[in-house]
Image (spheres, rainbow, N blue to C red):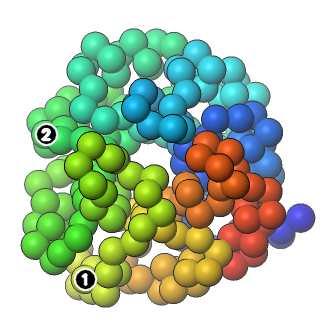
Amino acid sequence: MVENMNSSLRLKVCGITRLEDALFASNLGVHALGFVFYKESPRYVSPQAANEIIQQLPPFITVVGLFVNPSQSKVNKTLEACALDVLQFHGNETPEFCAQQSKRVIKAVAISEAKDLDMVQAFDCSVLLDAKAPDGVYGGTGTSFDWSMLAGLNHTHPLILAGGIDSENIARAKQVKGLYALDVSSGVESAKGIKDKQKMIELCEKFC
């Protein structure tokens, strides 16, 4: 088993669909777990199923719910059914929509070229920097963007890096300046939504 992680950088594993994966990641020292509430995603889990997993997690694990262009009613109903700590929005949600939420918010910004970074400052919340996916796809593609574009990027809230992070490149991801956390999904999977224990071990060993 990997020793407890003591890096000031945080690590989130997203796309959790099974209790065994959630517990294994938690025991490795992962700081946060993400549950996808976008029905078009192969990693979709219902709020009720997610909550069954969440209720069995150890304390001090941050629970994040991922949404794509939800109505406020959808967010509210999910929060009623599911004990979330943070809301993560991956669609075209506006700064105003993000600001009106009752929970802390992470807004994903899709990046493929430097001008995409201009969107970061529009959001008065934490921002997740993810590789731009094909139309209709929102994250979880296993692809990265050119991280060198982030040099000098500043934001008043935490910045989180996502997109194609795995055990092969996590050491390089850790060297990107100004990050609060790394977000991993496909990089620790054997199939979409199914986490691979050995991949999680190898990733966390290199994250430490």
Q: How many marks?
A: 2
Find disc 2 in the rendering and name its residue: 94
Q: Is residue 97 left or right of residue 146?
A: left
In the picture as drawn, the residue positioned furthest to the right comes out as 1
Give the distance between the C-alpha atoms of the residues marked 2 and 1, in whole angstroms: 24 Å
Amino acid type, residue under disc 2 in the picture? Thr
Q: Is residue 152 shown left or right of residue 172?
A: left
State left or right for residue 88 relative to residue 187: left
* SS at badge 1: helix
Q: Is residue 99 visible?
A: no
Q: Residues within 10 Å of mark 1 (few under 14, many from 20)?
A: some
Image spot of residue 6 (x, y percent): 69, 71
Q: In the rendered structure, find residue 71 and report the number of the disc placed on it.
A: none
5 vs 91: above or below? below
Q: Residue 149: which disc?
A: 1
Up the image or down, 8 lies above or below 35; here it is below
